[in-house]
Structure formats: structure tokens, C-alpha cells
Amino acid sequence: MQEIPLWYWLIVFFGLGACVGSFYNVIVYRMPRGISLINPPSHCPLCKKRIPIRYNLPIVGWLWLRGKSACCKQPISVIYPIGEGLCGLLGALALYAAAGFGTDLMQPVKAPETWANAAALFWLLLGAYPVCAVDCKYKLIPDSISVGGIVVGLLISLIPGGITPLQSLLGAVLAGGGLYLLGWIATKVLKKDAMGFGDVKLLAGYGALMGFTGAVETLLVAALLGILVMVPYGMIKNKATKAKNAPENEEVGQIPFGPFLAVAAPIMYLWGEALFALYINYVFG
């Protein structure tokens, strides 16, 4: 492994990312509809015939079939290969970012911490896809991403060079527990639900991957992004509602918080320390 150049591993990570993207397409379609992710196996949504494995290959399968199902010749949405290709690029980006942007592609990847960081970034970057897709439309966060992040974070912490297993465990407990407590207090004060439990589990997963400090930084940046987006969005939606003389609705103008966490997490994992140092330097000179 130590003699294999970086460019080869980038191709491998692209392939892994595309495979994960294919699975995420299944999550985005099935989970909100209450369909098991395992049973029934992959099948045509129109004629219900089982899809052979050779046609399930990410990106290649869609190109092989020329964008039409093999059974009933109906068009297959281009969203599927686009999602798989995007996840493939994010997978390769995870390794390249962990190795250091600008690293010679002919150099082998030797440092254990590089693999630990690559695995964590792989999860953070690719996990943003299903979180954003499902939470924006259905106000749900897949447990496979939130709870799965806790498990993956604990496993990655076993790789030398990253955070320790104790830091990972404390990060999950303190980040998730702290956000749950904050949401509970806000609910009592506002007398309505202020924080979904899916967000709590998602931040707990980030705590397991990044440690408590990284999770707190992610929460703060996500809150800032949320304010920058939700305030003008809410004003626009409310104006549109009043213009149509539509009845007021509590959910008008609301945007789920999960996507902001999902976007902020990889940013803070990569540049959290640098951004914090820049902020301290700006505030205290």
C-alpha cells in the first residue's frame, strides 16, 4: 500500500464514492416512503422486475442502457448517474484534501493520519447528499447517516493519527446531549418544537468524527448559515403568502437545520482551526 501512488487511490475513492452514491439514491427514494432498504432488491419502479447486477453498476449501468430501463424501455432519470458521479468526485476529493491539496499525485500515501482524515472526510462529504435531499423535502434525516456517523466515527478513531476513541465517544455524547438539552430549553421557552431529534443524532455523529470542539464549531457555523438563509427566505415566503391572501401557516418559511449542519461539517473539519485562529486574531488583534 505504501508504494501505490496517490492517483491510483483517487480512482479507487472515486469508485467507492460512486457506489455509495448509488446506495444513497436508494435511501433518498425508499426511506421517506417507508420501504426497506434491503427488501425487495433493486427493481424497476414501473414493471417491478428485478434489475440484474450488471445494470446496477454506478454510472456505467445508466450509460450501458442509454438512459432507459432494460425491462420496459422507460426513461431512467439522469439524476441517478449525476448523483453517483458527484459522490464519486466527493470521494476522490476526500482523499486529496486529506493528503493535502497540491500533493504530487505520484507520491504514495503513507501517513496513518492521512487515511483517518480521508475516511472521516469521505463520510462527511458524501453524507451531505442524502441529508440535504431527504431533510429539505421530507423533514427527515436518515438514521443510516446520523446514527451511522456515530458508529463510523468510533471505528475511524481506532486508526492512529486521528482523534482517540475516548475523544470520539465524548464528542458524540457531549455534542448530541448538549444539542438535545439546548433544544429542550428552547422548546420550553418558545412552547413549540425547536429542534428535531434527527439534528441531535446528526450532530452526535459529527462529534464522534470530529470531537466535541469540532462539533461545536460546526453547530455555530451551521447556525450562522441558517440565519443568513432562513431570515430572507422566511420574509419572501411570508410576503408571497400575504399577497395570495393564504391562511397563515407555522411551517411557512421554515427550512430544516440538517442541511446546514451537513454543509458546515466538512468545512470545519478541513479549516476549523484556521478559521478559529483567524477569528481570534480579528477580535483580539
Image: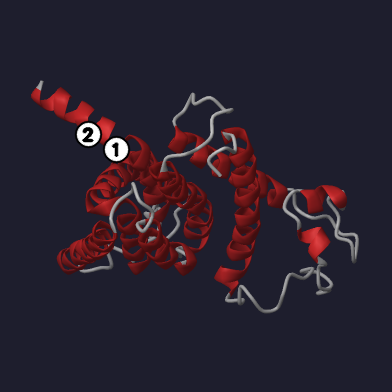
Q: Which mark is residue 276?
A: 2
Number of disc labels: 2
Q: Residue at x 31, y 61 (%)?
A: 204
Circle 1 packing at 10 Å, graded few (<14), some (14-19), many (20+), is: some
Residue 177 picture location, percent across and down: 22, 66
| Visual colour scheme | secondary structure
Give percent across and percent down for residue 55.
82, 59
Return the mark for residue 272: 1
Q: From the viewer's perspective, is 173 left or right of 101? A: left
Amino acid at dot 1: Gly
Left/right placement of residue 38 relative to residue 217 reads right
Q: Quadrant of the N terminus?
A: top right
Q: Tell me the quarter of the picture where residue 257 sits.
A: bottom left
Which image quadrant is residue 53 in? bottom right
Q: Name the side, left or right, on which 213 lies relative to 245.
A: left
Q: Residue at x 25, y 68 (%)?
A: 192
At label 2, the amino acid type is: Phe
Q: Secondary structure at mark 2?
A: helix
Asked whether the viewer can see residue 238, the reply is no
Q: Give the residue displayed 90% in from the left and 60% down from the top.
A: 73
Q: Nearer the viewer, residue 55 or 231?
A: 55
Q: Are marks 2 and 1 in contact (CB under 8 Å)?
A: yes
Q: Residue at x 39, y 60 (%)?
A: 251
Give residue 218's position: percent from left, percent from top. 30, 47
- Secondary element under disc 1, as helix, strand or loop, is helix
Taking the image as drawn, is residue 182 in sight?
A: yes
Look at the image and tell me in which quarter the C terminus lies: top left
